[in-house]
Image (cartoon, rainbow, N blue to C red):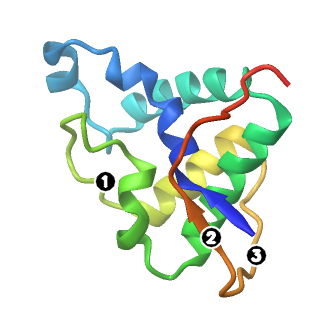
Amino acid sequence: MQIFLGYISKMYYYLQAMSDDDLDDFDINDERCRVKLFDAMKADFDTYGPVSKQRVLEALEFILSSGDLERYWRAVVPHAVPLDEVKDKPGYVRALYQKLTGREPLKREFDSNVELINDLHGIDLRL
């Protein structure tokens, strides 16, 4: 099975488009800020085709089930944007998944045959 971790980062345009002043005022741990961020991420996600949506959700499920959230955290929140450290990382990933799907993340078992793909060529926003 292939897991496309890079698909998550494509939903962070909201943060990447912010001015430095706006970023200074943005607190990723503040509920109001996070609601705006997740709303924008959901709007982007809704433009994705079914394959790309599946890849985002599988990546989030994989990260949650990995038992090593820190190892994959760079795929969850873009480090090119200067943000405070997320205080509750598992809660953040679960809340993002819920926002995107309207349900709790699936509890999945991933075997040792998982191949992590960082290449974003082929992201399909139209299907």
Q: CA distance from mark 1 to mark 2?
A: 27 Å
The residue under label 3 is which amino acid type? Arg
Q: Which mark is residue 68?
A: none
Q: Decide which of tag 1 and tag 3 comes sooner along the chain.
A: 1
Label 2, secondary structure: give it.
strand
Of the 4 image quadrants, the one containing the C terminus is top right
The residue under label 1 is which amino acid type? Val
Q: CA distance from mark 3 to mark 2?
A: 16 Å
Of the 4 image quadrants, the one containing the N terminus is bottom right
Q: Is residue 10 above or below residue 110?
A: above
Residue 117 found in image quarter: bottom right
86, 7: nearer the viewer: 7
In the image, taking residue 31 as reference, residue 100 lies left or right, namely right
Q: Position of residue 105 (x, y in %)?
A: 72, 61
In the image, taking residue 93 as reference, residue 18 lies left or right, namely left
The residue pinned by badge 3 equals 108
Label 3, secondary structure: give it.
loop
The residue pinned by badge 1 equals 86
Q: Is residue 102 visible?
A: no
The residue pinned by badge 2 equals 115
Q: Is residue 48 above or below residue 101?
A: above
* Tags 1 and 2 touching, CB below 8 Å: no
Q: Residue at x 35, y 25 (%)?
A: 15
